[in-house]
């Protein structure tokens, strides 16, 4: 993992550093694009827009749980965690059962 990303995660988790969290958000936003496209294709434009509006609401919580020492690639963590979260959001909004 890139040293800068590791530093942002560490600063956020230890100090609740808002700047580090903002940088991490900016870095991870592009990782979510394939999920936005996948769920938009599956459930329609409104569902995709809902996810785009909601993705950062749980970012603080999600990244408070990421474990650097586990060795799970950041991309895998983001994709898997957000896939689960997005399914919850869509279910709550009535898109899935």
Image (tube, rainbow, N blue to C red):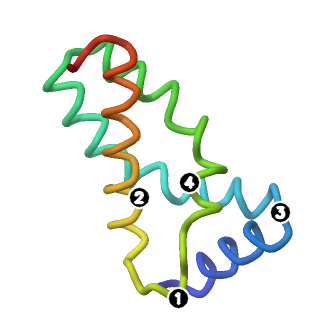
State yes or no: discs 4 and 1 in contact (Cβ < 8 Å).
no
Q: Which residue is mark 4?
A: 62
Measuring from the top left, give residue 47's x and y in whole percent.
31, 18
Q: Which residue is mark 1?
A: 69
State yes or no: discs 4 and 3 in contact (Cβ < 8 Å).
no
Outermost residue to the front: 97
Callout 2: few (<14), some (14-19), or many (20+) C-alpha neighbours within 10 Å? some
Q: CA distance from mark 2 to mark 4?
A: 9 Å
Measuring from the top left, give residue 16's x and y in whole percent.
82, 62
Instruction: Report the mark closest to the observer, 4 or 3.
Output: 4
Q: Which residue is mark 2?
A: 78
Which residue occupies 23% across, 30% down? 39
Which residue occupies 45% across, 29% down? 52
- Residue 17: assigned label: 3
Looking at the rendered structure, the secondary structure element under dot 1 is helix
| Sooner in the amino-acid sequence: mark 4 or mark 1 | 4
State yes or no: discs 1 and 2 in contact (Cβ < 8 Å).
no
Measuring from the top left, give residue 76's x and y in whole percent.
32, 67
Callout 1: few (<14), some (14-19), or many (20+) C-alpha neighbours within 10 Å? few
| Sooner in the amino-acid sequence: mark 4 or mark 3 | 3
Measuring from the top left, give residue 43's x and y in whole percent.
19, 19
Answer with left or right where residue 57 lies relative to residue 33.
right
């Amino acid at each position: 993992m890139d040293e800068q990303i590791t530093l942002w995660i560490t600063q956020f988790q230890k100090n609740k550093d808002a700047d580090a969290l903002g940088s991490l958000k900016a870095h991870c936003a592009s990782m979510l694009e394939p999920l936005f496209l996948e769920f938009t294709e599956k459930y329609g434009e409104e569902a995709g827009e809902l996810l785009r509006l909601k993705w950062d609401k749980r970012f603080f919580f999600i990244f408070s749980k990421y474990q650097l020492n586990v060795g799970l690639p950041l991309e895998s963590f983001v994709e898997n965690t957000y896939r689960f979260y997005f399914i919850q959001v869509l279910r709550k909004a009535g898109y899935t059962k």
